[in-house]
């Protein structure tokens, strides 16, 4: 709530005050109880100070299993608890009955105009992607958009399925989402680094990369027949320096990793070519007849608060806050790696971030951790000896000595994780 | 708001009052304007009486194009405006960040428990489907669930794509969603009535049927190798008498047609077999990594209000209201058909509805209208001569003399539609 006084008019105050009362009353008296996330949020928020996160407060290790296999972005819960009232969403029962948006001129007929506006605004403020003369296609997360792009960019003649490749280590979902329907339009073609086939292909370029966090460009050494899809889910200043506006044909983003709202299932694509955007829209129409209007409106509100926080001259922006959180975690992890010598994490080059105005190394959403000291199966070692669930390197087209570990869990989990991997005992119990 | 006083406790009153104030203040002062649906809702609600809809109030025909091609369920907007405050959804900014639901024991890991509970409750109250010992899988609308069911029920060995069939006139999307990815798992096999191939197949049974409204059973005259998916989107008492609890292996429902909230994109499947439910869940995980939590929570709230309205002994239920709306429209349409003699609509047998406790004929969400007097292309005739956009029978595997017309638009549109099709002039301008 640090920046609240500057941006509030009397009517905002009134709305905010009512929203606070309403949500608190709901929380306190709601007889149905809600889910545990609700309860955590309420009990947590009353304990929160406006000071930065205290990562040095190591939690008591109760011996529970730590699941760091997924990139569940609960690290952001704290920020949204602190500034959450400004993003409280109120949806009356009669709103969004229609399949359609009030958006007749837009190629993506189910895009809520307010969301389209806030997507453009946040990219302009952060400077991480070109939005001018681009079509916006909204999706149920960027996973749906990736499939929409495959559908749109594959040849629909009888030339057979086009190969889809990505350089290892690649996002473990790519082979799965390419092949699960045994499509005649596209098929998984494996590691882009060793791909040698003639003819057209699609290369998925994730930058910063999931799982290892490195910045990437296309790698296939080929003629001009490669079609590129850029997955830029992590090209935000909390993860990596923003050095220029990304300017590719198809760029995918998601609320899950930018603002941390994975449960909303909202992603967006910035698309240069009209026909590609039209076919991506067609895919989403056939697949799910559009995208939840409730979540689109909520995403618009969340992005607006993020942009407002960046426009503020006195308070720290959302990205400033989340940069600090990631920075502290990575410093601790790197120190732990040095102290322990049993595992390593990647080294990243320093670059200047145009948005934050400072030089720093990438601090990715995942740690691509390598077990040393002759541990062959790192996933098994961490699971059996440390009760830490991770995702093995083998699912990313790489070696079993690697695992991917989420850096986006809540503080308490991260602190126990750090404690366990630096402990020399083989069991933490 | 008729039933409000009976179900309200002091704390509900407090919440309601705050919600009303909050949404009104938001509406009045919101500088960003919102979309036109918002503005319509607000200006409309102040004009609404609690009396039934007045269908005799024929609107002035301004000559605009009427688009009745889609089943956009805006007919329900009036009901939700009248009772909407009870369904106002408030979502704090820190809620639903995680991909996961607090739902560890559920096979469908992204299902919000509150939604699961309300789905069971509404089916038990209406008596339209067996829920005991069924798995619930939530989807981004029933369209995604239909594809999840195809994925789950197709053989995943190398026996080639299984044929998917449905009796004509069939839902026009079925061939499209079966074939758009050229899947090696399944392919469109055409009209179930003329299907003669040996071996396993999947039959899509829509009952009441889209487009013609008739109750249906599987039609393929075959051995026991048929796998059935029942699309029961319209098996609700406003459309057809509820004569028994549907009891099939895979049953699909959607908020779009039951409560009218198409913009939420929420559907659900009731599934008998654990492995089928698991594979449907797997499909949705691969396709969109779950389903919008915001819309799931909102759907739970809407279904709760619907069930509460049915439990009320003094006020009319949601289904009572919507039955009346559909009943009045169908009486007017049938009278118009008799008067005009230029078109016909289907005749339905009367049956007793266990839920509403009365005998009536089906009054479907779509009119399957047949042009008479030698009009070969009904869609073209209505488009060119009446400025009414419909969907031609050819897309449903039937004749061009038929069109499908939505019966779910707002009153003003329906009234102009009626006026135009009964007018003898070839142009309404």
Image (spheres, coloured by chain):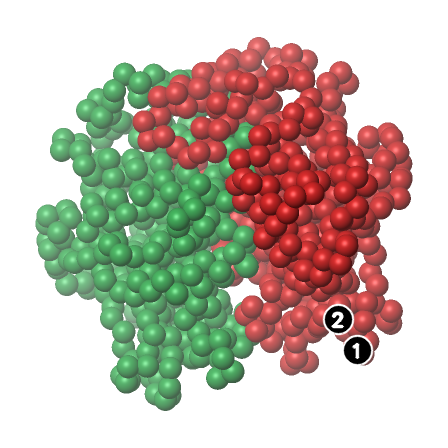
Chain colours: A green, B red
Q: Nearer the viewer, residue B59 or A177?
A: B59
Question: What residue is at 19 percent from the left and 51 percent from the top?
Answer: A127
Task: Kindly state the secondary structure of the residue where label 2 is placed.
Answer: strand
Q: Nearer the viewer, residue B328 or B141?
A: B328
A170 vs B106, left or right, is left
Q: Position of residue A391 (x, y in %)?
A: 42, 63
Question: What residue is at 44 percent from the left and 41 percent from the top?
Answer: A102
Q: Is A396 drawn above or below residue A123 in the view shown?
A: below
| Tag 2–tag 1 contact (CB < 8 Å) | yes
Chain letter for the residue marked with disc 1 in the picture: B
A45 vs A265, left or right, is left
Q: Looking at the rendered structure, which numbered label has been put on residue B197?
A: 1
Report whether residue B113 is seen: no
Report whether residue A338 is seen: yes
Q: Is B209 drawn above or below residue B331 in the view shown?
A: below
Crowd around label 2: few <14 · some 14–19 · many ≥20 (10 Å): many
Q: Position of residue B396 (x, y in %)?
A: 69, 61
In this view, which residue lies farthest toward the front? Answer: B425
Residue behind mark 2? B201
Q: Is A119 drawn above or below residue A46 in the view shown?
A: below
Q: Is A318 drawn above or below residue B371 in the view shown?
A: above
Task: Kindly state the secondary structure of the residue where label 1 is placed.
Answer: loop
Question: What residue is at 44 percent from the left and 74 percent from the top?
Answer: A154
Q: Nearer the viewer, residue A88 or B423?
A: B423
- Count of marks placed on residues: 2
Give the foreground label among 2 and 1. Answer: 1
Chain letter for the residue marked with disc 2 in the picture: B
Q: Position of residue B167 (x, y in %)?
A: 77, 63
Cα gap from disc 2 to disc 1, whole angstroms = 9 Å
Question: What residue is at 35 percent from the left and 54 percent from the top?
Answer: A136
Query: Could you confirm whether marks 2 and 1 are on the same chain?
Result: yes
Q: Quadrant of residue A387?
A: bottom left
């Amino acid at each position: 709530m640090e920046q609240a006084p500057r941006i509030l008019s009397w009517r905002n105050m009134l709305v905010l005050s009512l929203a606070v009362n309403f949500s608190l009353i709901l929380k306190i008296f709601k007889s149905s109880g809600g889910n545990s996330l609700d309860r955590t949020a309420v009990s947590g928020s009353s304990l929160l100070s406006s000071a930065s996160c205290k990562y040095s407060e190591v939690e008591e290790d109760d011996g529970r299993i730590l699941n760091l296999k997924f990139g569940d972005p609960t690290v952001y819960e704290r920020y949204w608890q602190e500034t959450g009232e400004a993003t409280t969403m109120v949806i009356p029962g009669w709103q969004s009955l229609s399949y359609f948006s009030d958006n007749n001129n837009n190629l993506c007929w189910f895009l809520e105009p307010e969301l389209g506006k806030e997507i453009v605004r946040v990219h302009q403020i952060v400077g991480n992607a070109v939005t001018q003369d681009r079509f916006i296609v909204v999706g149920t997360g960027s996973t749906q958009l990736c499939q929409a792009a495959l559908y749109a960019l594959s040849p629909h003649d009888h030339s057979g399925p086009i190969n889809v490749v990505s350089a290892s280590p690649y996002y473990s979902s790519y082979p799965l989402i390419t092949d699960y329907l045994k499509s005649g339009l596209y098929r998984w073609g494996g590691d882009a680094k060793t791909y040698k086939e003639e003819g057209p292909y699609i290369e998925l370029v994730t930058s910063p990369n999931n799982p290892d966090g490195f910045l990437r460009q296309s790698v296939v050494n080929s003629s001009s027949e490669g079609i590129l899809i850029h997955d830029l889910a992590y090209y935000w200043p909390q993860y990596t320096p923003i050095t220029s506006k990304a300017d590719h044909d198809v760029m995918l983003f998601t609320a899950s990793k930018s603002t941390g709202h994975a449960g909303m299932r909202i992603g967006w694509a910035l698309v240069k070519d009209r026909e590609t955007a039209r076919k991506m829209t067609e895919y989403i129409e056939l697949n799910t007849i559009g995208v939840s209007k409730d979540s689109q409106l909520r995403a618009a509100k969340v992005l607006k608060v993020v942009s407002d926080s960046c426009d503020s001259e006195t308070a720290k922006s959302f990205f400033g806050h989340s940069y600090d959180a990631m920075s502290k975690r990575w410093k601790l992890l790197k120190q732990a790696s040095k102290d322990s010598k049993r595992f390593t994490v990647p080294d990243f080059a320093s670059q200047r971030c145009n948005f934050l105005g400072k030089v720093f190394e990438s601090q990715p959403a995942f740690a691509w951790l390598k077990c040393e000291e002759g541990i062959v199966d790192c996933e098994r070692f961490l699971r059996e000896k440390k009760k830490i669930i991770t995702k093995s390197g083998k699912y990313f087209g790489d070696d079993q000595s690697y695992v991917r570990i989420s850096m986006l869990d809540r503080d308490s989990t991260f602190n126990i994780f750090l404690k366990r991997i630096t402990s020399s005992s083989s069991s933490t119990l």
